[in-house]
Amino acid sequence: MEHDNIENIIKDFELKLLRKDIRNNKNELKNIISKDFIEFGSSGFIFCYDDIIKGLLNETEEKFYEIIKMDTKIISENIILVLYTIKMNNVTSNRSSIWKNENNEWKIIFHQGTKVNING
């Protein structure tokens, strides 16, 4: 049962990162994004910790999204993989994130987004 609780906590953190009030709050971002963070964006660009913090803080538009499916996989006691499909602003993408327990705090260490071609 303990695993279910940890997986739900990680799902909540993942969803938290989609909220504008969190994306625009430097302290909140620093609490959930690892200094070792890296992202392979759906744009094809690669982002590091400083890039992502700066980019999120400068976002001005509200993101409207629908989670189509979200699953978690426990890789080890301190590593959890989150896999989900999201439709955001009429663009569907598959997303994956790796969360790591760093000094008893769960932080996102990796994220990747891949656009889905729904037309075949």
Image (cartoon, rainbow, N blue to C red):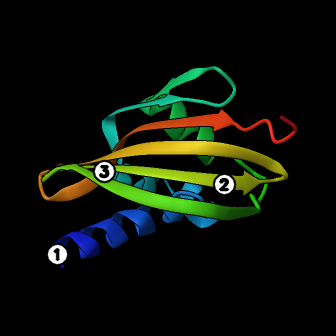
Identify the mark at residue 86; answer none if there is no mark: 2
**21, 6: nearer the viewer:** 6
Badge 1 local density, few (<14 within 10 Å), some, or many (20+)? few
In the displayed structure image, the side of residue 119 where residue 40 appears, left or right: left
Q: Are marks 2 and 1 in contact (CB under 8 Å)?
A: no
Question: Which quadrant: the C terminus?
Answer: top right
Front label number (2 vs 3): 2
Q: Is residue 57 visible?
A: yes
- Which residue is rendered at x = 68% and y = 43% of the image? 93
* Horizontal relation, residue 72 to residue 91: left or right: left
Estimate the x, y position of residue 51 in percent, counting from the top left.
Answer: 52, 29
Provide the secondary structure element on which disc 3 rests: strand
Badge 3 density bin: few <14, some 14–19, many ≥20, Cα 10 Å: many
Cα gap from disc 2 to disc 1, whole angstroms: 27 Å
- Secondary structure beneath dot 1 equals helix
- Of 24 and 38, which appears nearest the observer? 38
Q: In this rendered view, identify the residue nearer to me: 102 or 79.
A: 79
Instruction: Name the residue beneath numbered marker 1.
Output: 2
**What residue does disc 3 label?**
107
**Residue type highlighted by circle 1:** Glu
Identified by mark 3, the residue type is Lys
Whole-Å distance between the Cαs marked 1 and 3? 18 Å
Mark 2–mark 3 distance (CA, rounded to whole Å): 21 Å
- Amino acid type, residue under disc 2 in the picture: Ile
- Whether residues under marks 1 and 3 lie with C-beta atoms below 8 angstroms apart, the answer is no
In this view, 32 is above or below 8: above
Whether residue 58 is visible to the viewer of this picture, yes or no, is no
Task: Identify the residue shown where x is 41% and y is 52%.
Answer: 82
SS for tag 2? Answer: strand
Report x, y in % for residue 118. 82, 42
- State the residue at coordinates (13%, 58%): 104
